[in-house]
Image: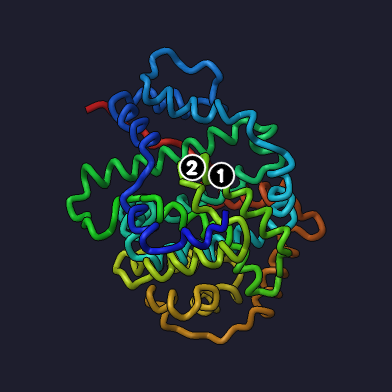
Amino acid sequence: MNKLQLYTNSEFDPLRLRQDPLADQAVKSLIGNPDWITTINNWEYIPTTLPEEFNVELTEFFTFYLQRLDHAQEKDLKPGQDFFAQKGDLYLAMLGFYSLPYCYAFGDGAEVLVRSQRIVNQIGERLGETGSFVLGLFEPGAFYQLKSTFLLVAKVRLIHAFSRYFIKHYASDWKIEYGQPVNQEDMLGTNLAFSFIVLRGMIKMGKNPSENEQQAVLRYWKWIGELMGIDISYWPESSKEAFELDKLIRRRQLKKSEAGKVLINSLVRFYEQTIPDDLLKSQLNGILSFFLGKEAAEALGLSERIEISGDILGWMFGYLGWKNYGGKKGFSAIRQNLELQHKRQFGRVLGIQLPALTRS
């Protein structure tokens, strides 16, 4: 089916009201039974026999993943993992310098993010966890050999549902015009930011992924999207469809917001404090503006314009990759480098854990 006919306002307006009932019901169960959170956080993978004390809703949530253990196909997933193994350093760089700031420029979605104090006050740890999540997704053999990856995705899906729950019950300033928090349109946009926008960032630097590589990444995130509770009937099958989907969401949602400005200012401050490379740090606003483009940069209040060419940025990031990895770049080297950064900054390697709750 050609997805282009789905990319209309009439199709996407209802998506702002749709969320993820399976995960939302599971989180209600966890809120009422916080000890189950500890049980899940102690798992290394989803057990094929779930604890008897789990209620129907939580059992159904994890059964969704158990039923998909045998659906992961190496032929579909390995090309995406191979791409990350070759270009994972650039992939992670684009997440930090393009994908995440791009999400901040979408005003209504930014309203969810800014209500998480961790993304504002503990942004370093939040970014580190995001890096660990993406790294775990692309580990060689993920899903079709490493069943622990299903648990990783399930945890992040539940974390999204926790965000919805806390906003619904405690954010008295939430406005209906934002849509439902963490809705289907915003989840599609985030999935696109972690895939197509990363690829577009590489293209802007002259590191042009082939059409086959782009399709491999889109196919990979289609699989992840389904596991994350996204309606993948809207997910693009080609770079052209991805371009049109991004254009639609951009037209609908990109706008100035105080939430977006708070988020980008927090990110810039963190980079200024932690980026060790003086050249990169000195050109920070210009680099962000280059990737974001004029409209998104202005929406975030990034008024400083430093003329930088894509070729120069490609050289800069390429040089940093060589500096960090030499001729040994690959998944293991990328993971080792990321874990070393975590230990230096936080004293430990960061991972994904469900929020600990106490009984009231």
Q: Residue furthest left?
A: 172
Residue under label 1: 224
Residue toward you, 78 or 341: 78
Residue under label 2: 228
Q: Where the C terminus falls, by quadrant?
A: top left
Give the structural element (helix, strand or loop) at label 1.
helix
Report the disc number at residue 204: none
Picture quarter containing residue 302?
A: bottom left
Q: Is residue 184 left or right of residue 290?
A: left
Say if mark 1 contacts mark 2, CB within 8 Å: yes
| Residue 38, position as x, y percentages in the image | 42, 26
- How many residues crowd mark 2 within 10 Å: few (<14), some (14–19), many (20+)? many
From this view, report whether residue 297 is shown above or below residue 357.
Answer: below
| Residue 319, position as x, y percentages in the image | 72, 70
What residue sits 63% from the left and 74% below the top?
A: 204
Asked which colour scheme the image uses, the reply is rainbow
Residue 122 seen in the figure: no
Give the structural element (helix, strand or loop) at label 2.
loop
The amino acid type, in three-letter code, at marker 2 is: Met
Residue toward you, 240 or 29: 240
- How many residues crowd mark 1 within 10 Å: few (<14), some (14–19), many (20+)? some
What residue sits 60% from the left and 44% below the top?
A: 137
| Residue 277, position as x, y percentages in the image | 61, 70
The amino acid type, in three-letter code, at marker 1 is: Ile
